[in-house]
């Protein structure tokens, strides 16, 4: 009977060790994937930020130039005035649109950072997972005494 008990304990420990190793490996792999996603996400956010900044400056400058021209009297010229008035309106709306896109990009950056941090938190928990301690804690809570 003692031999069966030893075999059972040995097989149970071996199974527990394999389980822990697989959980640790899963945590490591999930953290590696999250690191790669975070790197790509940061590159996209940085590049889009640079592009939006340049676009915002160009549209803002063009809007101001056309506005000054229209204020100087180009608006009163029959055909040219209509075109510059429409151009000024379009540039102004484009500048406002780019500003909204910049706000959305900032919001996306903040939200994605929160999501990635949450993923890293759970990945770290998987890496630190210890089945033996978890089961001992469950048994102690179940019995209500210091059995383990």
Image: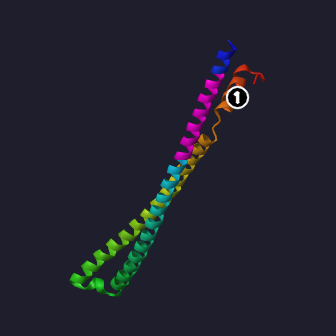
**Quadrant of residue 59 within the rendered picture:** bottom left
Q: Quadrant of the C terminus?
A: top right
Image x and y of residue 40, in percent: 46, 58
Residue at position x 59%, y 28% in the image: 15
Q: Quadrant of the N terminus?
A: top right
Would you place residue 94 above or below residue 2 in this image?
Answer: below
Would you place residue 148 above or below residue 107 in this image?
Answer: above
Q: Label 1, secondary structure: give it.
A: helix
Q: Residue at label 1?
A: 137
Residue with the most extreme bottom position = 72
Q: Give the side of residue 21 with respect to residue 36, left or right.
A: right
Image x and y of residue 28, in percent: 56, 46
Residue at position x 69%, y 21% in the image: 142
Highlighted magenta segment, given as a residue range: 8-29
Residue with the most extreme top position = 1
Task: Tell me if I can see residue 13 in this picture.
Answer: yes
18 falls in the magenta region: yes
Image x and y of residue 21, in percent: 59, 38
**Quadrant of residue 65 within the rendered picture:** bottom left
Residue at position x 50%, y 59% in the image: 39
Dominant secondary structure of the residues highlighted in magenta in the image: helix
Would you place residue 30 above or below residue 132 in this image?
Answer: below
């Amino acid at each position: 009977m003692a031999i069966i008990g030893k075999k059972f304990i040995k097989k149970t420990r071996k199974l527990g060790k394999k389980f822990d190793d697989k959980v640790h490996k899963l945590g490591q792999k999930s953290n590696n994937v999250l690191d790669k996603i975070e790197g790509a996400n940061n590159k996209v956010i940085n590049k889009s930020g640079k592009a939006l900044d340049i676009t915002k400056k160009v549209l803002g400058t063009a809007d101001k130039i056309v506005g000054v021209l229209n204020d100087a009297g180009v608006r009163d010229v029959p055909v040219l005035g209509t075109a510059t008035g429409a151009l000024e309106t379009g540039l102004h709306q484009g500048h406002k649109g780019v500003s909204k896109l910049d706000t959305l990009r900032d919001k996306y950056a903040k939200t994605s950072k929160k999501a990635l941090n949450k993923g890293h938190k759970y990945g770290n928990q998987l890496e630190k997972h210890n089945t033996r301690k978890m089961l001992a804690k469950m048994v102690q809570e179940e019995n209500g005494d210091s059995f383990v």
